[in-house]
Image (cartoon, rainbow, N blue to C red):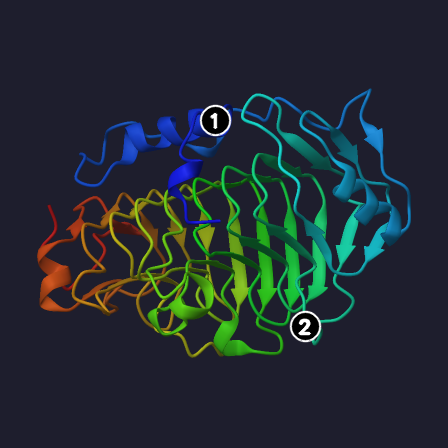
Amino acid sequence: MTGPAPRLRALAPALVVLSLLFAGCSAGAPADQGSTSASAVPAADATCAPGAEPVGPSSRDLQRALDAATPGDVLQLADTTYVGAFTITRSGTADDPIVLCGTGASVLDGGGIDRASAALRLAGAEHWVLTGFSVADAPTGIVLDEASHNELRELEVSDTGGQGIRLRSASSQNLIVDSVVRDTGVVDRDLGEGIAIGSTESTWCRYSRCEPDASDGNVIVGTTVDHTAGEAISAEEGTSSGVVRDNRLARGDGTSTDAVVDLKGNGWTFAHNEVGDAAGPGVQVHSVLPEWGLGNSVVGNTFGGSAEELVIDVVGTTARAATEVGCDNAMTWGPPARANTTCS
């Protein structure tokens, strides 16, 4: 594949969700516009329902079902634990996504946090809806590689050696909604982010052909991320135009990261989130390269912590000049949130 451009075509229902979110929280818009909440995100059209195709109880059954999936299929996981590293390479379409759904008793178990592969990897796969099941006990829970226009709904991802969910290699226009990510970085605390988007500049030659990892337009909404060894959410340099909205975000004890959330890309909107107490800022905007860390918006959030703490930290003169910090950011107990730049 040659990057994200060919993927920017009509998508229903995911682009409907994206348009609703961006309409209310584009960078530079007043904070009171379009107060979209998680409840306003429309439910996926296809879910576990009568007529869904049951997946057998073995790990081989699951991989075979993934390999044979065609647009419009609904694959219903059994109430069992599937152990292994599973890969999705087939794609649905905008009109006929492929659904993989389960219940609270449906678990994808990576087989150990010290293994080499993610429990579930989407490799170039598009138009999937993953919903209703759990992923655990893996080095990374879910990885998207060159995988766009997918929805991750009502999932629980936990107990990972490194990251919980990773979107990389130009994985764009994906939606993570109403999910839970927790207890990440059990083995590698430095890679213990709950949700990581993109790749750092030092790894662009590995993941994005030595160009910025344009994992753009991804949306995280209505999701709880906590007890992470790294940042709850990290958006790397090279990413653009994402939305982090209406989430509950916190880290675990003993973390060495600078902030609960780190925004290093361009044009990200961080709005109406609840950010837990942090030893350090709740959200940090970084310009690690001159052309990145710009045009981001931090509006309408609430933060735990004390009055003395700097909870919104915009690092670098260039980033401060190009970052919108709303005066409506506040502490959970009432006063305005403290920032190192003038609010507007």
Residue at the (66%, 32%) spot, across then down = 98
Residue at the (61%, 21%) spot, across then down = 45
Amino acid type, callout 1: Leu
As helix, strand or loop, the secondary structure at mark 1 comes to loop
In the image, taking residue 195 as reference, residue 110 lies left or right, namely right
As helix, strand or loop, the secondary structure at mark 2 comes to loop
Choose the circle earlier in sequence order: 2 or 1.
1
Q: Up-down: is 36 above or below 60?
A: above
- Residue 65, image x and y in percent? 81, 41
In the image, taking residue 74 as reference, residue 285 lies left or right, namely left
- Residue 69, image x and y in percent? 74, 35
- Residue 214, image x and y in percent? 36, 52
Can you identify the residue that label 2 sits on? 116
Looking at this view, name the residue that lies furthest to the front: 2
Residue at the (42%, 32%) spot, across then down = 37
Q: Up-down: is 320 above or below 192?
A: above
Amino acid type, callout 2: Ala
Q: Is residue 179 visible?
A: yes
Can you identify the residue that label 1 sits on? 11
Q: Is residue 341 visible?
A: no
Q: Residues within 10 Å of mark 1 (few under 14, many from 20)?
A: many
**Front residue of this view, candidates 107 and 225:** 107
